[in-house]
Amino acid sequence: MQTNPYGTGPSATPPYSARPYDPTIGHSPTMTTGEERTVATLAHLSAIIAMIVSVGWLSFVGPLIVWFVYKDRSDFVRNAAAGAFNFNVWAWVMNVVAWIMLFTIVLAPVAVVLWIVAGIMTLWCHIRGAILANRGELYRYPATIGLLQ
């Protein structure tokens, strides 16, 4: 008689990452560790690429796309993409606040400082996140607005 390594009862199903692909219930196949690291690295770097292409305004789109595509396939990739997205929302809010300050004239120097801080932090944090993701480590961003989990 074979025993179930996950116990008995309703919680006897294996963890999601151990389940095989089942087309009848729609589970996606799990990813290998190398694929997870590559896609998580892409989630971090996609924000920088989108930032350059859109002059800073759409940096959250890359991580959001990665999150939508891979959120059910890997917890590691989902957490990396959600962290990158949440951080980019924070940086986007900083940019909007800086633009509002710019139009008040008196606060224009503060706006310039906010843009510099947001730009440097965005580059530093995403590059650091990509390096750690490539090693298989999860990076926690220093500032986020928690929209995705």
Image: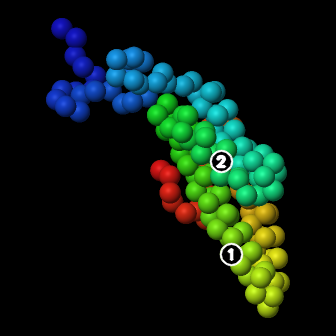
- Give the residue at the far bottom of this rendering: 106
Q: Which residue is located at x 39 percent, y 23 percent?
A: 26
- Quadrant position of residue 62: top right
Relative image position of residue 46 (x, y in whole percent)? 72, 43
For the residue pair 16 and 110, the one nearer the viewer reads as 110
Q: Under tag 1, what secondary structure?
A: helix
For label 1, the crowd category at 10 Å Cα-Cα, with few meaning under 14, some 14 to 19 and many 20 or more, is some
Identify which amino acid the numbered label 2 is placed on.
Val
Q: Which residue is located at x 39 percent, y 30 percent?
A: 16
Per the image, the residue denoted by label 2 is 61
| In this picture, residue 108 sits left or right of residue 90 | right
- Give the residue at the far top of this rendering: 1
* Number of the label disc, if any, that sits on residue 37: none
For the residue pair 124 and 50, the one nearer the viewer reads as 50
| In this picture, residue 22 sits left or right of residue 44 | left
| In this picture, residue 112 sits left or right of residue 73 | right
Q: Is residue 19 above or below residue 72?
A: above
For label 2, the crowd category at 10 Å Cα-Cα, with few meaning under 14, some 14 to 19 and many 20 or more, is some
Q: Is residue 92 visible?
A: yes
Relative image position of residue 149 (x, y in whole percent)? 47, 50
| In this picture, residue 130 sits left or right of residue 52 | left
For the residue pair 86 and 99, the one nearer the viewer reads as 99
- Quadrant position of residue 35: top right
1 or 2: tag closer to the N-terminus = 2
Q: Is residue 102 above or below residue 123?
A: below
- Quadrant into which the N terminus falls: top left
Q: Which residue is located at x 63 percent, y 27 percent?
A: 34
Q: Which residue is located at x 16 percent, y 29 percent?
A: 9
* Number of the label disc, if any, that sits on residue 97: 1
Q: Under tag 2, what secondary structure?
A: helix
Relative image position of residue 59 (x, y in whole percent)? 71, 52
Are the residues tagged 1 and 2 within 8 Å (C-beta)? no
